[in-house]
Image (cartoon, rainbow, N blue to C red):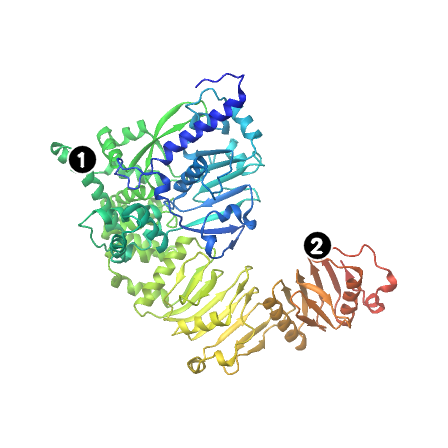
């Protein structure tokens, strides 16, 4: 409809209607299996929420219940922002999630964050190569059916509307993310554009130069509950319990796929194929499953065609060298290629071959635009896993053809195992002979050695064949680091499960900055990435190391952890913000726990190491500090009680306390100036070895200020008193300052 410029108020209505029509075409065409294009679903009929982690800078905000929904990212006070990033690995449902938001907006779904939004703009960034203007992108991609709305109109409506949300999907596939020339997408992320408009970005990895207000939400995939919900919702029906158990049993019979089926896209294909194929088999490896799935795609295509064409289709099932080489070239480069023009793809593959892979759904067509508003048909793999599958065939071919003449450093130059693990695993499964060389190559790298074990399993399909390697790995310290990728953590957890399941002793398990809690009900350790360590019977020594994130471990959790780890011979806790129970009542200590007498040690980095006495449940201390100690006391009763305990031990032993900061924890001074009162009611006595006292983030009136001066007067070694970000009296009468403090020249800041 061509609109006259005399009716601007009508243009906004028509623009919104055009947006809704475009989104409806997209969300009504969700394809669950690539090769079945004649059965499409509305997104609301198949969308299931997986797990979510809510991150604020480098910390993880977590709780139970409603926190398992993405909606908390829009409602919780800690997550309020105009910039939100939803991170997720390939296949974790980022695009489907954006379609669900579009559905909610179009249909004003009650309870959705999109319910009351005036204008929703949803753009696929992979389609915007060379498009520098966001208004041009909206015009060309979303409003092609409404030519009467100009770019100027779009800008005016966005600026004048009360509530606007932008969804930018797939930054990791954005062709211009490394372009030196500025564009509106980069300006939006830096808050230079639309600094009063909500923007949601989905991506596999974080862009650089993000605005500091950006909040991060990470998609963690499907757990068992999410998988059950999808089966009921999209495969067998809500009330078909027999059908649900049937698919569950098929997954249970294929434990090698348990990890892969955390990826929603893969589980969706698994569930539908398992439900429909009567000859569904058990698989020894991920390679076996993927080979079977590709065979199903070819079989489905053959069944849809005339019999004279069957032989022609069989050729493409066996010979796909051109597609293999194209896939390998796409991922073995610094900036992986996501999209090709249809012309380029046909030239590389040949017309017949292209038509076959397009009909199978392995290759997908979509429109892409440029800054001059021209459109062309772009082609991409249905999912990155398919690209890795065919690239792995090319690797296996090159290595088998040229053997020792192949430089693996050159062959894998741009292929990080953490990003492309399945290329390595598939190549080992496709050709076990070349797999030996790949495994040796990975084993020589410190960070890739754990991937090598998975490649061994892929090559042989038999856990028994890798037990020697697992045993060797477990003879050293096994570390799960909080800064490791989720993939690396998941692989380590898998290998620990293999070790425990075969009775292999784990000499030392080091949980470095990743411990979240011990789940007493399910008797497992939960780490911050939400993975669970469920089989801990063969762990000999455990070290739990904290970060600046507070961790409280209750009496029940500590005793439950020790009871679950039947073979544990020693456990260490270390970290300034790890808080263990101050004591354990003797009646809670079972006789078997006393008999085992497992050393439980606790150090907070302040020069005192505590060890639990199993006879009375109290902590005995050993002073290791021979240097001045720095100590912080934060909010929270348990932490303040530990702080008091530590300060008293150090001061009594004559150890210099170089620095004590009361961060949001100072309350007052007792009238006789003998003790500091903390916010929990806990008191700190006069510290004769304290050198510097810092009170931060607390307002202090004149009366309390003078009490603080009187307290510091009794701390005979103190030489500095500092207030940080506090409201303090503007002026203090010199007559009120204790003479002793003047004589000692205590510095006040």
Q: Residues within 10 Å of mark 1 (few under 14, many from 20)?
A: few
- Is there any visible trace of residue 667 in the rendered image? yes
Task: Identify the element where label 2 is drawn.
Answer: loop
Measured as percent of width and height from the top left, residue 629 is found at: 64, 68
Q: Earlier in the sequence, mark 2 or mark 1?
A: 1
Residue that mark 1 sits on: 304
Q: Residues within 10 Å of mark 2 (few under 14, many from 20)?
A: few
Quarter occupied by residue 479? bottom left
Residue 140 versus residue 607: which sits nearer the camera? 140
Tell me the quadrant of the picture where the C terminus can be found.
bottom right
Q: Is residue 120 above or below residue 6?
A: below
Q: Is residue 178 left or right of residue 91?
A: right
Task: Identify the element where label 1 is drawn.
Answer: helix
Q: Is residue 498 above or below residue 221?
A: below
Q: Is residue 256 left or right of residue 743?
A: left
Q: Is residue 535 left or right of residue 298?
A: right
Measured as percent of width and height from the top left, residue 150 is found at: 50, 21
Measured as percent of width and height from the top left, residue 465 is found at: 25, 62
Quarter occupied by residue 327? top left
């Amino acid at each position: 409809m061509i609109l006259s410029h005399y009716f601007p108020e009508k243009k906004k209505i028509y623009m919104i209607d055009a947006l809704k029509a475009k989104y409806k075409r997209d969300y009504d065409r969700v394809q669950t299996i690539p090769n079945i294009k004649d059965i499409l679903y509305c997104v609301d009929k198949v969308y299931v929420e997986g797990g979510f982690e809510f991150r604020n800078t480098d910390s993880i905000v977590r709780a139970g219940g409603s926190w398992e929904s993405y909606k908390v990212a829009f409602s919780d006070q800690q997550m309020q922002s105009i910039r939100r990033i939803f991170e997720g690995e390939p296949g974790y449902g980022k695009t489907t999630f954006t379609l669900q938001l579009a559905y909610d907006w179009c249909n004003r779904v009650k309870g959705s964050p999109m319910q009351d939004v005036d204008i929703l703009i949803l753009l696929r960034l992979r389609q915007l190569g060379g498009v520098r203007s966001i208004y041009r992108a909206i015009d060309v991609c979303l409003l092609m059916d409404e030519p009467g709305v100009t770019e100027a109109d779009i800008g005016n409506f966005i600026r004048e509307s009360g509530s606007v949300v932008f969804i930018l999907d797939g930054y990791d596939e954005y062709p211009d993310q490394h372009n030196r020339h500025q564009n509106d997408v980069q300006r939006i992320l830096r808050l230079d554009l639309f600094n009063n408009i909500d923007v949601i970005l989905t991506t596999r990895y974080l862009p650089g130069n993000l605005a500091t207000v950006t909040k991060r939400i990470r998609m963690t995939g499907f757990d068992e509950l999410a998988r059950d919900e999808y089966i009921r919702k999209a495969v067998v029906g809500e009330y078909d319990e027999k059908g649900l158990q049937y698919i569950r049993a098929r997954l249970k019979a294929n434990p090698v796929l348990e990890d892969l089926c955390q990826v929603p896209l893969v589980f969706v294909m698994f569930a539908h194929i398992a439900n429909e194929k009567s000859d569904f088999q058990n698989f020894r490896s991920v390679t076996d499953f993927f080979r079977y799935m590709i065979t199903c795609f070819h079989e489905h295509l053959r069944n849809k065609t005339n019999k004279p064409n069957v032989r022609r289709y069989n050729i493409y099932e066996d010979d796909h060298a051109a597609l293999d080489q194209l896939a390998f070239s796409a991922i073995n480069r610094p900036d992986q290629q996501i999209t090709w023009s249809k012309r380029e793809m046909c030239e590389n593959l040949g017309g017949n071959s292209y038509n076959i892979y397009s009909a199978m759904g392995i290759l997908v067509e979509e429109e892409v635009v440029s800054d001059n508003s021209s459109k062309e048909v772009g082609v991409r793999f249905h999912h990155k896993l398919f690209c890795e599958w065919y690239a792995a065939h090319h690797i296996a071919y090159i290595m088998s053809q040229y053997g020792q003449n192949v430089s693996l450093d050159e062959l894998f130059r741009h292929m990080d195992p953490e990003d492309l693990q399945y290329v390595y695993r598939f190549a080992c499964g496709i050709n076990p002979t070349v797999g030996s060389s790949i495994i040796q190559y990975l084993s020589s790298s410190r960070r890739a050695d754990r991937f090598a074990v998975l490649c061994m399993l892929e090559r042989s399909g038999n856990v028994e064949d890798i037990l020697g390697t697992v045993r060797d790995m477990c003879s050293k310290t096994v570390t799960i680091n909080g800064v490791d990728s989720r993939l690396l953590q998941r692989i380590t957890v898998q290998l620990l499960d293999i070790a425990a399941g075969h009775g292999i002793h784990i000499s030392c398990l080091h949980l470095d900055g990743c411990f979240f809690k011990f789940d007493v009900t399910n008797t497992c350790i939960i780490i911050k990435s939400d993975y669970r360590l469920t089989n801990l019977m063969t762990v000999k020594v455990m070290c739990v190391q904290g970060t600046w994130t507070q961790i409280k471990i209750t009496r029940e959790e500590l005793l439950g952890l020790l009871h679950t780890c039947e073979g544990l011979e020693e456990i260490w806790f270390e970290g300034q913000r790890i808080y263990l129970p101050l004591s354990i009542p003797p009646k809670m200590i079972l006789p078997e726990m006393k008999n085992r007498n497992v050393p439980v040690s606790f150090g907070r980095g302040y020069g005192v190491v505590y060890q639990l006495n199993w006879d009375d449940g109290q902590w005995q201390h050993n002073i290791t500090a021979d240097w001045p100690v720095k100590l912080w006391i934060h909010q929270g009763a348990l932490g303040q009680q530990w702080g008091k305990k530590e300060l008293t031990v150090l001061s009594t032993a004559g150890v210099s306390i170089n620095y004590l900061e009361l961060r949001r924890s100072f309350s007052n001074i007792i009238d006789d100036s003998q003790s500091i009162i903390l916010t929990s009611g806990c008191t700190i006595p006069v510290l004769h070895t304290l050198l510097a006292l810092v009170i931060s983030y607390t307002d202090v009136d004149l009366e309390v200020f003078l009490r603080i001066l009187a307290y510091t007067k009794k701390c005979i070694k103190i030489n500095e008193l500092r207030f940080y970000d506090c409201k303090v009296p503007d002026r203090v009468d010199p007559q009120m300052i204790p003479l002793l403090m003047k004589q000692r020249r205590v510095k006040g800041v």
